[in-house]
Amino acid sequence: MQALQISIVSADEAPAFCRQLSALVNHTPMHLARVLETAVQVYPVRLDSITGQATVRTCELRMRHAQADLTEDVAERVLARVRACYEVTEVRFTTSSGSPTATSPSTATSPSTATAA
């Protein structure tokens, strides 16, 4: 089974972050499988958004149906929804063993228009 791993910068508390991200992803063929807090940043992340403390969270998104393939089209749609609310810093496709398979050029990170507060 393939998964999409994305690193997101957020100032939200963990429960609120997970609720919001689940709500974003649940309108797609994917679901939020797990979230890991990977780092805390205390400097301004973006001039127009977070100026206090932010957390970088690595989130694993999987297809709802294990037999379904994770296509680039599905990944792009999910990433567009997430980037509308959060700053995505890294995107990776992984296999069920957790090893990275590829980072697609079209899914490379770009600044979002807003970061959830």
Image: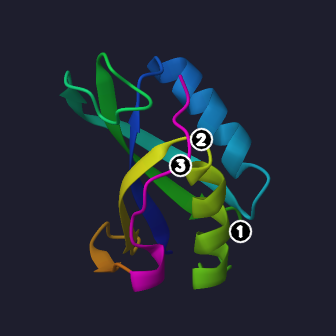
Q: CA distance from mark 1 to mark 3?
A: 12 Å
Q: Is residue 106 magenta?
A: yes
Name the main secondary structure of what is drawn in magenta.
loop
Q: CA distance from mark 2 to mark 1?
A: 25 Å
Mark number for residue 65?
Answer: 1
Residue depicted at x 46% and y 74%: 107
Range shown magenta:
104-117
Helix, strand or loop at mark 2: loop
On screen, residue 70 above or below 64: below
In the drawing, does residue 79 fall left or right of residue 93?
Answer: right
- Image quadrant where residue 36 sits: top left
Closest to the camera, between mark 3 and mark 2, is 2
Please provide percent x and percent y for residue 80.
62, 61
Check disc 1 and give the amino acid type.
His
Badge 2 is on which residue?
85
Helix, strand or loop at mark 3: strand
Q: CA distance from mark 3 to mark 2?
A: 19 Å
Please provide percent x and percent y for residue 19.
64, 28
Please provide percent x and percent y for residue 33.
53, 49
Q: What colour-coding does the image apply?
A: rainbow
